[in-house]
Structures are given as C-alpha cells and as structure tokens.
Amino acid sequence: MIKLEAKKDKFMNIQDVPSPIDLRNPQDALNWANEANDKRPWRYDFFDYYVSFIQELEQQRDHIKNTLPIHVLEIGSGPGFLAKHLLSHCLNIHYSAVDFSQAMHELSKNKLLSGELERASYVIADFKTSQWRDDLAHYDVVIIHQALHELRHKHHATQFHIEVKSLLKPNASYLVCDHIFAIDAMQNDELYMSKYEHFQRLKQASYQHVNLVKEHQGLCLFLTKI
C-alpha cells in the first residue's frame, strides 16, 4: 500500500517541461522552420522512408484496382516540410495536417503548389487537450514526426497513443518518430524517452506489433499497428 501511494503521489506531482519558444508566434515559428533542416539535415532520410512506405501502399491499391486516395494524417505538422515531401512524391494521397499553430499552417500552405493544396486539409488543434480529435476523421496512415515530445512530459505518451487509435482505420499504420533520451542524444529524461520507453508506452496503449524501423543520430522511427 505504501509503495502504491508513493507511486500515485509521484505521478500526480508531475509538472510539464515548459517550452523555450512559442510556436504560435509567427516569428518563433519562422525561426524554428529556418533552423530545423540545418540542424538535422538527415530528417529527409526519414521523410524518404514515409514516401516509400506510402508508395508501396499505393502500389498495393493499384494491384487490386482500388483508386481511392490514401488518407494520411500528420500530427504536429509544423511548417510543412513533410507535407511538401509527401504531396510531391505520393500522387494518390489526401494529406491532413494537425497543429496548434496557425502560423505553422501558413508556412506549410505557402510551400505547396495549387494542385498539392487541393489534396491537403489543415486543422487547428492542440493534442494536449481532450478535444483535439473532434474535427478529425479516420486515416490509413498516421505520422507524428519529431513532435511527440511537445506533449511536454513523457508520462503523457501512453494516453496520447491510446487517443490516436480512435483515428486509425482497420489495418492502418501508425508511425512515431522522435528524439530519444540517450548518452549520445537528448539529455532531458522528463521530456524524451529511451528506445525501451517508446516500446513500453506503445505496448501499454495496446499496439501489438511495434518495430523500430529507422534510427539515425538520435532520431528513432517506430512503426506499429493496432
């Protein structure tokens, strides 16, 4: 009993890690966008993985003469680098972007050609709130890239993964990429998780097949399904 009460008290005392910037602010959003790829140019290796993954789904649909678009959701979509990469390489998708920052959405839209914008939807929602899924549908592929830590504490991850399940179509894929806590990576163990903790949180959310499919310089990508 004493141990259980201590564990409960510890969880209740968790305080979110404050963000050093306000990504709702247009200048902060622009500064982040200008620096992101310079700091980590290998982000595009992960973007290429998403493209290959979705193109394989497109080929599978072509084989069975299914012409319906693949519905892709990006959570924490930011300034649109991945949006542009997906829409320019995957021609039979409808892309939906969720972010809490209108400034980020504007940066994203400005990257897209008119034909790409026609295949994109933008939703303002803060995934730290209980209502963030209210205006969303169901998707074939859900991606959260380099944004999971914006929950601002790793102990929120299991509940977040549970909530994402309600957005997945049958046989949909959920791709989770974030920085990890490790000696040669991120050092804040309240904000970032180790590889083991990523597996643990996804398993706790009842995802049955969890695989580490790509890893490079402190970024790890996990692929899972219900």
Image (tube, rainbow, N blue to C red):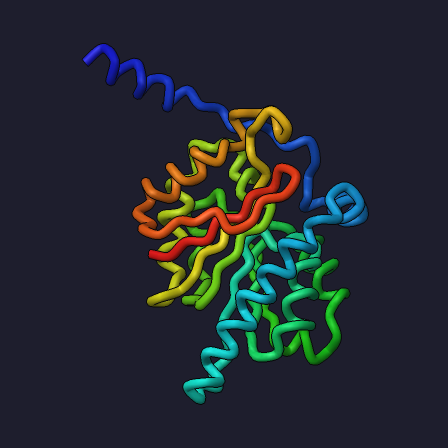
Of the pair 201 and 17, the residue shown nearer to us: 201
The N terminus appears in which quarter of the rendering? top left
Residue that lies at the very extreme toward the left in this rendered image: 1
User: Quarter-wise, where is residue 217 in the image?
Assistant: top right
25 above or below 175? Answer: above
The C terminus appears in which quarter of the rendering? bottom left
Of the pair 92 and 131, the residue shown nearer to us: 92
Taking the spot 45% from the left edge, 85% from the top edge, the residue there is 63
Q: Is residue 56 left or right of residue 104?
A: left
Q: Is residue 110 left or right of residue 116?
A: right
199 above or below 107? Answer: above
**Residue 136 locus on image (x, y percent):** 46, 63
Residue that lies at the very extreme toward the bottom in this rendered image: 65
**Residue 149 locus on image (x, y percent):** 55, 38
114 above or below 18? Answer: below
118 above or below 22? Answer: below
Q: Is residue 41 visible?
A: yes
Q: Is residue 28 visible?
A: no
Taking the spot 43% from the left edge, 33% from the top edge, the residue there is 197
Taking the spot 60% from the left edge, 24% from the top edge, the residue there is 183
